Structure formats: structure tokens, C-alpha cells
Amino acid sequence: MDLKGDAGLTGRKIIVDTYGGYARHGGGAFSGKDATKVDRSAAYAARYVAKNIVAAGLADSCEVQLAYAIGVAQPVSISIDTFGTGKKSFRRKIN
């Protein structure tokens, strides 16, 4: 699979930013946006959490999903899926 992106900054191919399609995404591009844009910063935060869950040996694979609503500072939903590879339970409901 060729993972080279195009030369543009704004709207660079989302597939490149999501590991060749391995990671799910909402469709918004990350490149060319400042860190205040939640579609970029939340995606990077979710990657960081997932990477550290795997690095800590808590799971072999991990996906973290965050959902935001306009005007709400905190995520309205947080989901962690270890695809059955988790060494510990990650069940928590966020209200």
C-alpha cells in the first residue's frame, strides 16, 4: 500500500494521517489546521492514549474514540476498544 501524501497542506489525504486506513476517522483532514481544531487535537489525543495503553502492556491493540459537540469543552463520549486483546477491563461510562 502506498502511503505517500500529496504535497498540499490543507486537507492532505486523511488516509495518510490515519495509518493507511487502519484507524477510523470522521472525515475531516488534520493537516493545515491549528491545534484548537478538535478534529485534529482530539485525534492526536486519542492516538496518544491508545499508543500508551499498548505500550504499558494493557492490550495488544487499542482504539480510542472521542466524540465532541459544538460548544461543549469535554468529550460527550469516550470509547476504548481493545478488540479482545485487553489484559484488564476498560469499562467506564461517561455522562
Image (cartoon, helix red, strand yellow):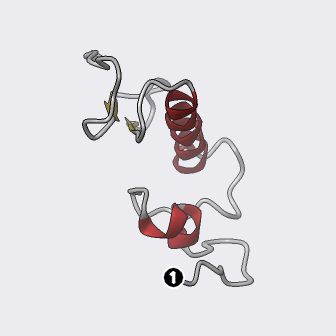
Q: Residues within 10 Å of mark 1 (few under 14, many from 20)?
A: few
Q: Residue at x 28, y 15 (%)?
A: 92
Viewer-side residue, 82 vs 57? 57
Residue linked to disc 1: 1
Quadrant position of residue 10: bottom right
- Residue 34 horizontal side relative to residue 37, left or right: right
Quadrant position of residue 31: bottom right
- Residue 25 horizontal side relative to residue 54, left or right: left
Viewer-side residue, 74 vs 87? 87
Number of numbered discs on residues: 1
Q: Amino acid at mark 1?
A: Met
Q: What x and y, as percent, mark residue 23?
A: 43, 56
- Residue 50 horizontal side relative to residue 7, left or right: left
Q: What x and y, as percent, mark residue 88?
A: 33, 17
Q: Residue at x 66, y 41 (%)?
A: 36
Q: What x and y, as percent, mark residue 66?
A: 40, 36
Is residue 81 positioned above or below 94 on the image? below
Is residue 75 positioned above or below 2 on the image? above
Viewer-side residue, 85 vs 72? 85
Q: What x and y, as percent, mark residue 77?
A: 32, 29
Secondary structure of the residue carrying tag 1 is: loop
Q: Residue at x 32, y 20 (%)?
A: 90
Q: Quadrant of the C terminus?
A: top left
